[in-house]
Amino acid sequence: MKILVLGDVMGPSGRNAIKKNLKKIIKNQEINFTVLNGENASDDGKGITQDIAEDFFLEGVDVITSGNHIWDKKETIEYINKESRLLRPANFVEGTPGKGYGIFLTKDKKFKVGVINLMGNVFMKKTDDVFEKAKKIKNIIKLKKDVDFVIVDFHGEITSEKMAIGHFFDGSSTCVVGTHTHVPTADTRILEKGTAYQTDVGMCGDYNSVIGMNKENSIKKFFKDKNATNHFPAIGEGTLSGIIIEADQKTGLAKKITRLIEGGSLHN
């Protein structure tokens, strides 16, 4: 079983990189299940629309996760209630539209995959306690009892929260993947009990930028230049950034984890 998890898709450059590369990667790498974080995929880098989500599904994406920008496009509130493959963080307050986790089938219908979307509490929008929510979900979706594999996307600002969640799910999930900061970290590894982990898998977008936004305008904003405008995405060639996990079908745990860096200005 091979799982591909891609970081935040950032604006048009990220979408173009998906369209240019994803089907080829899925075929060449013999990927069985693909997850990406789509919360920055819109033209302005804030939110996701129904059309964009459905384009991702056509390109081979099985589940789209998200984070703090999920509601930046109003249409998403209605769409997420109809489309179970689009997730929002599970620790959003009760009554929030959509779902924060689900069980999905691989394309060949052979395996059940649990996907859990969580968001950190530190320096993020107010949400319910992420660790308490993670504990509850861990008891609902049990590896090798309810599902064959479990993927956790933890959308958070600080590394310590992500690492703690990684260790919390170690041995009870196939992988824990950090998103949100748009910069891939160098700690790609398999944890002690068999869970693949990376603190942040980066973004799918133009790295000749400031976390995906136009670099010249971003510098102006840091200098408080009166000519600076609202942030807008860089539109150069995008890089796909993520990880590929090879998982054991008997245990559901990781056997191998490999970084994926494809195209654009970022290179392995």
Image (cartoon, grey):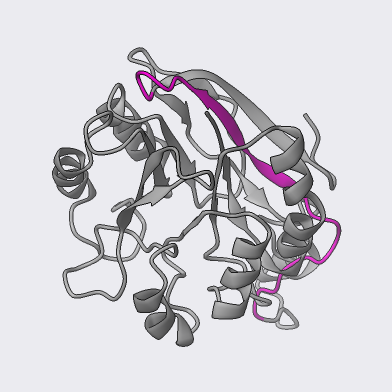
Residue in front for this viewpoint, 127 or 150:
150
Residue at figure coordinates x 66%, y 70% from the top left = 221
Magenta span main SS = loop
Q: 251 above or below 111?
A: above
Q: 151 above or below 12?
A: above
Q: Quadrant of residue 71?
A: bottom left
Magenta part of the chain:
230-252
Q: Residue 35 location, x and y as percent?
A: 53, 49
Residue at figure coordinates x 30%, y 64% from the top left = 99
Q: Residue 7 location, x and y as percent?
A: 58, 48
Q: Quadrant of residue 164?
A: top left
Q: Is residue 237 magenta?
A: yes
Q: Residue 101 location, x and y as percent?
A: 31, 54
Residue in front for this viewpoint, 96 or 50:
50
Q: 33 above or below 14?
A: above
Q: Residue 166 location, x and y as percent?
A: 35, 31
Residue 81 seen in the figure: yes
Residue at figure coordinates x 33%, y 39% from the top left = 161
Q: Is residue 80 left or right of residue 95?
A: right
Residue in front for this viewpoint, 201 or 108:
108
Residue at figure coordinates x 66%, y 62% from the top left = 10
Residue in front for this viewpoint, 131 or 33:
33
Q: Is residue 256 left or right of residue 265?
A: left
Q: On the rendered image, what quadrant is the C terminus found in? A: top right
Q: Is residue 4 magenta?
A: no
Numbered marks: total: 0
Q: Furthest residue to the front?
A: 109
